[in-house]
Amino acid sequence: MVNWLWMTGGLVVWATHFSGLYALSSLADVVTRADDFGWRIAGLAFSIACAIACAALLVLAMRRRRAGGPSFSSDIAALTAGMGGIAVVWQTLPTLVGH
Amino acid sequence: MTSETGFDADRYKRFPTRGPRPDGELEELERIWCKPKGWQWISAINNNYVGVYYVGAAMLFFVLAGLLAVLMRTQLALPMQGILAQETYNQFFTVHGTMMMFLFAVPAVEALGVLLLPQMLGARDLPFPRLSAYAFWAYLIGGLAFFCSLFFGLAPNGGWFMYPPLTSMTYSPGINADFWLVGIGFIEISAIAGAIEIIVGVLRNRAPGMSLDKMPMFAWAMLIFAVMIIIAFPSVILATTLMELERALDWPFFDPVRGGDPMLWQHLFWFFGHPEVYIIFLPAAGATSTIIPAIARTPLVGYRLVVMAMMATGFISFGVWAHHMFATGMPTISTSYFSAASMAVSVPAGVQVFAWIATLAAGKMRFNTPGLFAVGGLVTFVMGGLTGVMVAMVPFDWQAHDSYFIVAHLHYVLIGGMVFPFFAAIYYWLPMTSSRPLSERMGKWVFWLMFTGVHITFLPMHLTGLMGMPRRVYTYLPDRGWELPNLISTAGAVLTAIAVLLWIIDMARNFRPFGNREAGNVFDGPGLEWLPTGLYSVRSVPVITSLYPLWEQKGLSRDVEAGRYFLPNSATGRRETIVTSTLNAEPQYLQRMPVPSPWPIWAAVFTAAAFLLLTIQAYWPSLIAGVLGIYCVFNWCWTLDRPVDQLTADIGAGIRVPTYRAGPSSHGWWAMVLTLVVGGMVLSLAAFSYVFLWSRNPGEWTPPPPLASLPWILAPYAAAALLSWGACRILRLARPRSGLIATVLLVGASGLVGLGWVLEWEAWRGIGTDPTAHAQGAMVYAFLAWQGFFAFIATVMGLYASLRWVAGLIAPDRPTTYDLIALFVVYTAGQGAFAALLVHLFPGG
């Protein structure tokens, strides 16, 4: 299980990011407005944390790869971290653009 | 490579073994895995049989649904035609969409998995062949009943996504909608059963040495596909259950007047519905990633990137469901998140497309029929993907929403992403199961007619949609400029139908399954599925050292056929297969496989009958059918988990493994955990529904029962979990009365789960909660109904455990049955506690 979590780490971060943003905007919609400034800043902070997590996973996977660890799982971990990072950054843009 | 299980990989060097094999091994395998005779073909469970039945049934539904499409296109060929009446047209488009999505696309790829995976992975069969047989028969009976509803005017007519309030009792008072709701819920159970089979099969039944980096792309795709089914399909099960409860009992989940919200249906439906597109696409992409290297005669470019892309598609597809809801008035920021995810998912899809193009460029493309279908699918899918990015943009979607542009887009994606690859797969893999391959000449006709027909049908639809023609209209007025594109689309549909007809003729002429020999590897494929096989799958299970074993492991076919690898005989004199570890595929134990039995088929017949009778509100006959179904399942399970004659067995070259395994490394444990994940997903989505409905009208919600009642509800659940755990521990102590005490504890645990449920129900009844008065009460009672269902199953399991103990079938060295029942009871207790905490504490008093 740990190995699977490692390989899909970046995507798990993306899923957490997506769920978090959706929950935040839904909660904001109940409390004030979905695109209320304060809630958007909270969303942005969360997005930055997730992007950093993806970057950290990418660096860790590259290091493990260089240190001669299992190449397949490290490669997949690096690739999913990269893909997760792209998706997180892309999904952060609505928080910044158009408001 | 570090060992995962302690298995010494140096032992692989003993293979291929030398010297002649003892006489009679092959004959024994043939006797044990014998061909069904006469009526036994019905109770056959071998993947070679069930897989062919399954694919055949899926294609039957494809043809029937296609026929409806041709009739609809005929109706729309000219304005103001009266070939189909409005109501008939509504039923046709609903049944067409439903059949294509639920009865063709998903079952077809699942069927392909059942047919191909055992051979592709070097296993004798998938781990639960009776479950495969059950899933197939349930699907066939349910599907035929669903289609036949058309002939009685009872077919659903609310569109394949059945939005309320149109499908509520107010606007759809007949039983048409019930047919959809109950029928689809039932068919999804069959799909989930197949998914569990595939996950355990891919992770635990691979040939020794087939580590993850040597796993065929199709197996990767099927693994991700099956996991996605486990996550996504519970949503449609919950949605259909809630809708049926609303229609049958007037519980107002979707009625805004009483605190419900029709948007909840859309969220639940599309949480399933959009991943379903990728659920359909991924196995087809896996097939394409397998076929393209074979036809280009070169390894797939970017294998690891494609694996990542499939994983990413699997994940991100769960974050795009609301892009079907852009026109519903969701907050702008929320729609923007879904829009971004919808664009992001095109990145992994693009990675796969570029990997296929690069492979074709790197190799030497052969323009045979599978190659043409693979490339034709790629072109069509890319076109559909591009319009997908267009509709992912919210302002454009607002313009194109519910127009023929969307019809064009979704058909491009589904036909390019699934239908063409599926035809490629049929032409490519059919020689594996038939003594004759399909005709190349005719196949090329089929491809060109179908490719031309599809584009002639759907390309003009983009324009028809942009010119304003809405979906789901049975006719249109003249002089709007829609006549010509509609006429062209109908001509294209006729061409496509001719292509399918030619394919049927080709199949009738050449498809000869279940013979003593196969046409073989006519396309020079590199996978294990092209090894010589019998009904026992491969003669001996090879050690895998390459991603393309038939290309790179010289002499493999010869050595496998000569029995020079694992399991060259039947080590225990029964049906069996090797269970290997998840990551490195190291041999762990020998799994005894079940023999053919009529019980799974009868179980499918009676469960289907129970659901269908429920649809027509024949409650007592439905109950009787349900009881008979349970009786059949009892009989099905009764012969499992029996005493073993040998504790270990030689699986080749002196390597001995156990013949029985309990606990987390056993295949049964995995299947139960996956089943419980399905239950957990339904619970999570019910929790989402509860919070969602609260968020619509927080002020209307009433306080829950007094907090003092909560500990009394939680205590029986905690005690049930404790007793279940104790039952397993005590059974393993192997004392004289261990079996009796463990049985008593397990029965007590299932009783306590029931007690917890009764106390919870009493608490809400005590404060006068009425499920028909408001959505809050309806949700609470929905939780109670779900928990009651689980408590009932736990009670049935307790009864089953008692019967097994009475029959002397419980022993400390064979604890699997009790382990699995205990696991189920612990989950049920946890589920009850979670639901109780949620509805008592949120939103609270």
Image (tube, grey):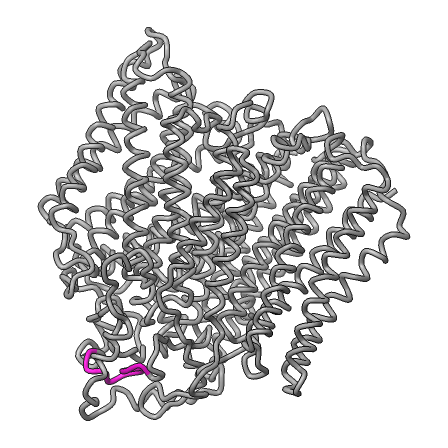
Front-most of residues B231 and B328: B231
Asked if residue B783 shows in the view, the reply is: yes
> Residue at 56% of width from left, 20% of height from top?
B171
Relative height, residue B497 to residue B198 (above, below)? above
Residue at point 71%, 40% (across, down): B779
| Type of secondary structure dominating the magenta stretch | loop
B229, B548: nearer the viewer? B229
Q: In the orientation shown, which residue stands out farthest toward the top?
A: B479
Q: Is residue B244 above or below residue B192?
A: above
Quarter of the image for the C terminus of chain A: give it: top right
Q: Is residue B260 left or right of residue B237?
A: right
Q: How many marks?
A: 0
In the image, B179 versus B680, the foreground residue is B179
Residue found 76% across the figure and 57% down from its top: B755
Quick check: can you spot residue B305? no
Q: Quick check: B594 above or below B247?
A: below
In the rendered image, which quarter contains the N terminus of chain A? bottom right
Q: Position of residue B756 (x, y in %)?
A: 77, 56
Q: Position of residue B107 (x, y in %)?
A: 38, 48
Instruction: Give the left or right position of residue B749, taking residue B281 as reference.
Output: right
- Within the image, what quadrant is residue B535 found in? bottom left
* Residue plotted at (25% across, 63% down): B36
**Residue B205's spot in the image, x, y percent?**
40, 71
Q: Is residue B665 left or right of residue B821?
A: left
Residue farthest left in this picture: B441
Point out the stretch of residues depicted in magenta: B561-570
Whole-percent x, y for residue B462 in the image: 35, 26
